[in-house]
């Protein structure tokens, strides 16, 4: 038994995208403890990759992450308790909650970006810088070719934030 699932055996696009992403997520989030953030786990990536610099509603973050509002609220509450985010009433809709990174949360964000860049550089060393540049260009083209998800405005407002 190889331990690979059907998609991996057949080399589907989903598997080809998912395997490197899973590796990056494990390496990047695994490196946070050494940077002073031992309580941040891979599951918290749903928060850090969907929050925007100006803050975001829990419901919007949940939609971007493809999870329930309750699950996102659980992650946000844990991060708020640890001092990584603050949760306040949304000034535009008092029924909604707005999540913002604290200075400690921003430090995690910066550490994630640095760890991601280092992991990418290690992968580029394995396949070559030119191939990595080509891969990035192709993935950028692919991302641009994907139609926006359906949403209230029909635009890309529900697209994930640029951070990890």
Image: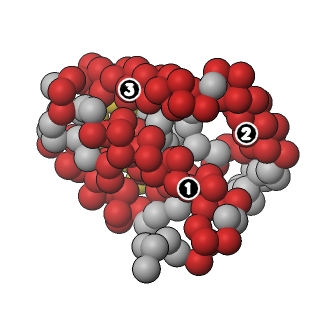
Q: Residue at x 82, y 52 (%)?
A: 147
Q: CA distance from mark 3 to mark 1?
A: 19 Å
Which comes before the other along the chain, label 3 or label 1?
A: 1
- Percent x, y for residue 49? 47, 40
Q: Please say whether residue 98 is visible from this viewpoint.
A: no
From the image, tell me which residue sits under label 3: 115
In the displayed structure, 142 sits above or below 101; it is below
156 on left or right of 67: right
Pointer 2 residue: 139
Q: Is residue 107 visible?
A: yes
Q: Residue 76 at x, y = what percent?
A: 29, 48
Q: Quadrant of residue 142?
A: top right
Extreme-front residue of the structure: 1
In the rendered image of this protein, does residue 91 appear above or below residue 43? above
Helix, strand or loop status at disc 3: helix
In the picture, which quadrant includes the N terminus? bottom left
Q: Does 128 sit left or right of 77 as displayed? A: right
The residue depicted at 23 percent of the width and 41 percent of the height is 40
Tell me the number on the disc at residue 18: 1
- Position of 26 compared to 124: left or right? left
Label 3 vs label 2: CA separation?
20 Å
The circle drawn on residue 54 is: none
- The residue closer to the viewer here, 104 or 26, is 26
Residue occupying image coordinates x 41% and y 62%: 69
Which of the two labelled residues, at mark 3 and mark 2, occupies the earlier sequence position?
A: 3
* Mark closer to the chain start, 1 or 2: 1
């Amino acid at each position: 038994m190889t331990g690979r699932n059907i998609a991996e055996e057949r080399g589907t696009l989903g598997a080809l995208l998912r395997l490197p992403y899973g590796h990056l997520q494990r390496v990047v989030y695994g490196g946070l403890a050494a940077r002073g953030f031992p309580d941040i786990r891979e599951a918290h990536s749903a928060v850090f990759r969907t929050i925007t610099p100006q803050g975001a509603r829990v419901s919007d973050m949940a939609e971007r992450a493809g999870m329930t509002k309750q699950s996102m609220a659980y992650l946000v509450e844990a991060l708020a308790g640890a001092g990584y985010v603050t949760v306040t009433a949304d000034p535009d809709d008092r029924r909604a909650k707005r999540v913002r990174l604290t200075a400690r949360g921003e430090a995690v964000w910066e550490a994630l970006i640095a760890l991601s860049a280092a992991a990418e550089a290690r992968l580029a060393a394995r396949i070559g810088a030119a191939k990595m540049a080509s891969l990035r260009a192709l993935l950028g083209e692919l991302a641009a070719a994907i139609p926006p998800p359906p949403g209230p405005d029909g635009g890309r407002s529900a697209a994930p934030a640029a951070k990890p």
